[in-house]
Image: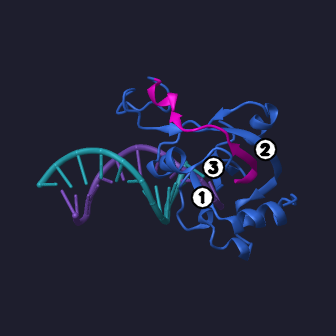
Chain colours: A blue, B purple, C cyan
DNA sequence: GCCAACGTTGGC
DNA sequence: GCCAACGTTGGC
């Protein structure tokens, strides 16, 4: 059981979209970074929990929690000619990009990036490291427990 | 294998 | 829209 943080632009997919259809498995499509792909393809396990992070919006921050609910499989969007995530270098017989499905767990109050930076307990968080651009990254158990317990007020 | 150029991410 | 930081590409 590991913890993660997954970034999404809410205009594309938001925690509200998951919440609106909590039984649905949402493919986490569009990741085009090898390190993030490797986390999804190789390291994640079904049942892992992840913070759902809203990026590229007015107030970026953690907006809720989702659960990894599938094994990894090829991201269809890499083969969609003319679409934003098309990758002409990737072949169906050797897909380059893999994803997993996630499902809604909880919405939280928005925890803005600027607020997360103020907590000494989170000073080592990868999300807050200078120049960090990874869209999928591990979260330590201590960070997870602090955020869910102290900032979200969820029972442990 | 180095590294400059370029494209992308993502906060502000 | 700007720009810092990073990842990728490709020439050498």
Helix, strand or loop under label 3: strand
Residue pointed to by mark 3 = A6
Q: Position of residue A19 (x, y in %)?
A: 80, 37
Who comes first in sequence, dot 1 or dot 2?
2
- Badge 1: chain ID: A
Who comes first in sequence, dot 3 or dot 2?
3
Q: Position of residue A32 (x, y in %)?
A: 47, 42
Q: Are marks 1 and 2 on the same chain?
A: yes
Residue pointed to by mark 1 = A138
**Residue at 58%, 56% in the rendered image:** A137
**Residue at 69%, 41% in the rendered image:** A10
Few, some or many residues within 10 Å of mark 2 (<14, 14–19, 20+): some
A97 over A143 or under it: above or below: above
**Residue at 52%, 34% in the rendered image:** A73
Who comes first in sequence, dot 1 or dot 3?
3
Instruction: Please give the range of residues in magenta.
Output: A60-80
Total numbered circles? 3
Q: CA distance from mark 1 to mark 2?
A: 18 Å
Q: Position of residue A108 (x, y in %)?
A: 82, 51
User: Which quarter of the rendering shows the N terminus of chain A?
Assistant: bottom right
Helix, strand or loop under label 1: strand
Residue pointed to by mark 2 = A105
Tag 1–tag 3 contact (CB < 8 Å):
no
Q: Position of residue A78 (x, y in %)?
A: 46, 31
Q: CA distance from mark 1 to mark 3?
A: 9 Å
């Amino acid at each position: 059981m590991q913890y993660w943080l997954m970034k999404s632009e809410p205009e594309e997919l938001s925690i509200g979209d998951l919440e609106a259809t909590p039984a649905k498995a949402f493919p986490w499509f569009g990741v085009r970074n090898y390190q993030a792909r490797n986390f999804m393809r190789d390291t994640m396990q079904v049942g892992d929990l992840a913070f759902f992070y809203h990026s590229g919006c007015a107030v970026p921050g953690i907006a809720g929690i989702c659960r990894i609910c599938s094994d990894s499989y090829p991201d269809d969007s890499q083969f969609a000619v003319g679409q934003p995530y098309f990758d002409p270098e990737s072949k169906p017989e050797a897909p380059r990009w893999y994803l997993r499905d996630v499902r809604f767990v909880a919405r939280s109050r928005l925890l803005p990036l600027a607020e997360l930076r103020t907590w000494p307990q989170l000073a080592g968080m990868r999300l807050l490291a200078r120049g960090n651009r990874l869209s999928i990254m591990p979260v330590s158990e201590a960070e997870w427990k602090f955020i869910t317990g102290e900032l979200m007020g969820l029972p442990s």
